[in-house]
Image (tube, helix red, strand yellow):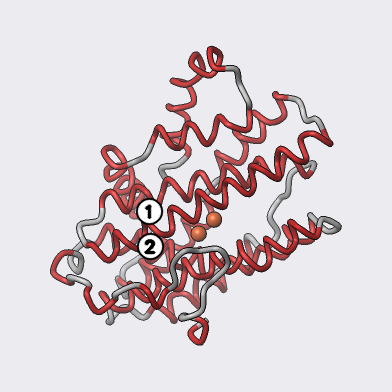
């Protein structure tokens, strides 16, 4: 990754080399342990994107446009997210052994989550991807809103914009397959719900655990500690979570008429709050 830092990655409008890491205001971030955990856990998950991309590319075998985009744009951009977050963590918290903790994370993660359960057909898998990108776009938008430090704000804004762009791609591919496969609105709703409820649960848990074990050497990892971590994101999200954006993105594949959309909006909003607070 390091040798490519100056090259453009995928369709992203930024590169890791554009980020002014030397301008980080350490005093604004170094004692913020909530953001430390969130950013570091996110860096683990993003940088591991290539571990689970293969299944997805294989699933769309025979559609060269999608295969090409996933491999040459989407995956590379996700890896760039990980590279930027990793560099931020290493710059602000140099005592944290990122490589060691990441190694332990991959050891555990690769035994549990290597094979993702793909949806029953290609249109529904695109719905699932829309849910995941909605989750990540909202997560990084929350961090960018909440960040007290300008360089972190810049990185998370860039990443959030990329995730919205990924969503748009997946949504366009969804429409393509929807026309061919004609999934029922109920099956789309079911897919939105199923993917929504498991989004980020297992990977966030394992990532947090290994960040914690490295940071708090000797202390035992407990589920209560993880619950506190989740609560910290919910607390940040109370004022910074982009509910309106998340709701719009999540409703789109349902293609509801405007009046119906308005009726279900509060229910979806409540669901979004639940789903996208890790
Ligand atoms: Fe990402
Ligand atoms: Fe993404």
Q: Nearer the viewer, residue 110 or 66?
A: 66
Q: How many marks?
A: 2
| Element marked by disc 2 | loop
Q: Is residue 179 left or right of residue 84?
A: right
| Label 1 packing within 10 angstroms: few (<14), some (14-19), many (20+) | some
Q: Which residue is mark 1?
A: 226
Q: Quick check: 205 above or below 51?
A: above
Q: Quick check: 155 above or below 169?
A: below
Residue most extreme to the right: 62
Residue at the (76%, 41%) spot, across then down: 176
Q: Which mark is residue 221?
A: 2
Q: Earlier in the sequence, mark 2 or mark 1?
A: 2
Residue 89, percent across and down? 33, 73
Q: Quick check: 71 above or below 248?
A: below
Location of residue 68 (image quadrant): bottom right
Location of residue 209 (image quadrant): bottom left
Q: Is residue 107 left or right of residue 222?
A: right
Residue at the (42%, 74%) spot, across then down: 16
Q: Which mark is residue 64?
A: none
| Label 2 packing within 10 angstroms: few (<14), some (14-19), many (20+) | some
Q: CA distance from mark 2 to mark 1?
A: 8 Å
Q: Answer whether labels 2 and 1 touch (C-beta < 8 Å).
A: yes
Q: Tell which tag, 2 or 1, sits nearer the viewer.
A: 1
| Element marked by disc 1 | helix
Q: Is residue 152 left or right of residue 81?
A: left
């Amino acid at each position: 990754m390091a040798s490519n830092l100056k090259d453009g990655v995928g369709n992203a409008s930024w590169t890791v080399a554009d980020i002014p890491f030397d301008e980080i205001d350490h005093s604004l971030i170094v004692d913020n342990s909530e953001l430390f955990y969130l950013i570091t856990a996110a860096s683990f998950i993003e940088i591991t994107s290539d571990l689970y991309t293969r299944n997805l590319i294989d699933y769309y075998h025979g559609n060269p446009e999608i295969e090409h985009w996933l491999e040459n744009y989407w995956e590379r951009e996700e890896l760039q997210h990980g590279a930027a977050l990793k560099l931020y963590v290493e710059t602000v918290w140099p005592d944290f052994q990122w490589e060691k903790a990441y190694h332990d994370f991959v050891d555990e993660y690769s035994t549990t989550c290597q094979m993702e359960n793909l949806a029953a057909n290609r249109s529904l898998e695109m719905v699932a991807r829309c849910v995941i990108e909605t989750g990540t776009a909202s997560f990084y938008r929350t961090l960018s809103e909440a960040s007290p430090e300008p360089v972190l704000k810049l990185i998370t804004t860039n990443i959030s914009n990329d995730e919205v762009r990924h969503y748009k791609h997946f949504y366009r591919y969804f429409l393509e397959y929807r026309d061919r496969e004609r999934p029922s609105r109920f099956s789309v709703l079911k897919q939105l719900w199923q993917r929504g409820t498991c989004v980020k649960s297992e990977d966030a848990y394992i990532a947090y655990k290994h960040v914690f074990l490295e940071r708090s050497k000797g202390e035992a990892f407990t589920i209560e500690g993880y619950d506190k971590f989740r609560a910290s994101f919910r607390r940040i999200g109370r004022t910074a979570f982009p509910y309106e954006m998340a709701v719009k993105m999540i409703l789109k594949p349902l293609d509801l008429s405007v009046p119906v959309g308005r009726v279900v909006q509060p229910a979806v909003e409540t669901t979004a709050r639940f789903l996208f607070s890790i």
